[in-house]
Image: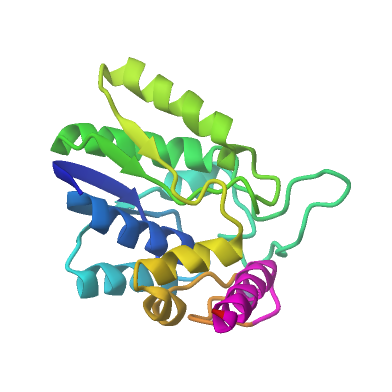
Amino acid sequence: MIKKEKAVVVFSGGQDSTTCLFWAMERFEEVIAVTFNYNQRHKLEIECAQNIAKELGIQHHILDMSLLNQLAPNALTRNDIEVKEGENGALPSTFVPGRNLIFISFAGIFASQIGAKHIVTGVCETDFSGYPDCRDVFIKSLNVTLNLSMDQQFVIHTPLMWLNKAETWELADQLNALEFVREKTLTCYNGIMADGCGECPACLLRNRGLDQYLSTRKEL
Ligand SMILES: [Zn+2]
């Protein structure tokens, strides 16, 4: 454990950020979760995040980011935009331009206010669906920018950056949180908790990873 240091976790209530929350709790003396409300299509996402933070006894802040939806309406916030994979190199309809730039920057401002040095985010380049702001190079660049902009020594941690979904489940298991993450998080684009609808791109990725991990786990 990195004693006496605070970490701010960018927390959505989904599988990845909940795993990051457990990861941070093992390492930092004080963990604070920050959730961004940008009028997600499913209000349940915010409720899930609230319930998880409450159950884990984590200080939780919900920040209003509805401005993002005014600028860039997308399939995560609007019912009339279909969730679909990008074709011919195009970004998927779930991509929100600048989302991680804005969220992690605001997490940085918040961290500077409360004297936290560490920022933890569940972004991942391995399964990244083509989102440019999930790439390691972007996070490293933003870390430098935040430090220069606020004269701080932030460290952005990305424990999932190089993990595939099966390995993310494995990490949750190592943190003794596999069942918790499986039952209490919401990843599904159709707003169904835990194992979800089983059909949307987020569920396919999540459930395929879980099946893959559980099949190797049984062999142990
Ligand atoms: Zn689903």
Q: Is residue 68 placed above or below 23 in the rendered structure? A: above
Q: Which residue does the image show at 66% across and 81% down from the upper left?
A: 198
Residue 65 picture location, percent across and down: 40, 48
Where residue 214 sits, quadrant-wise, is bottom right
Left or right of 138: which side holds 107? left
User: Is residue 146 found left or right of 137 in the rendered image?
Assistant: left
Residue bounds of the magenta highlight: 198-219
Residue 62 appears in view: no
Q: Foreground residue, 201 or 182?
A: 182
Q: Left or right: where does residue 157 sit relative to residue 168?
A: left
x and y percentages locating residue 180 in the rendered image = 37, 78
Magenta stretch contains residue 200: yes
Q: Residue furthest left?
A: 4
The image quadrant of residue 213 is bottom right
Residue at the location (41% across, 47% down)?
Answer: 121
Residue drawn at point x = 39 percent, y = 67 percent: 174
Q: Quadrant of ligand 1?
A: bottom right
Residue at 34% across, 73% down: 176
Indicate yes or no whether the magenta region holds residue 6: no
Is residue 90 shown above or below 53? above
Task: Provide residue 32's location: percent of width, then percent of height.
Answer: 22, 52
Front position in the image: 99 or 144: 144
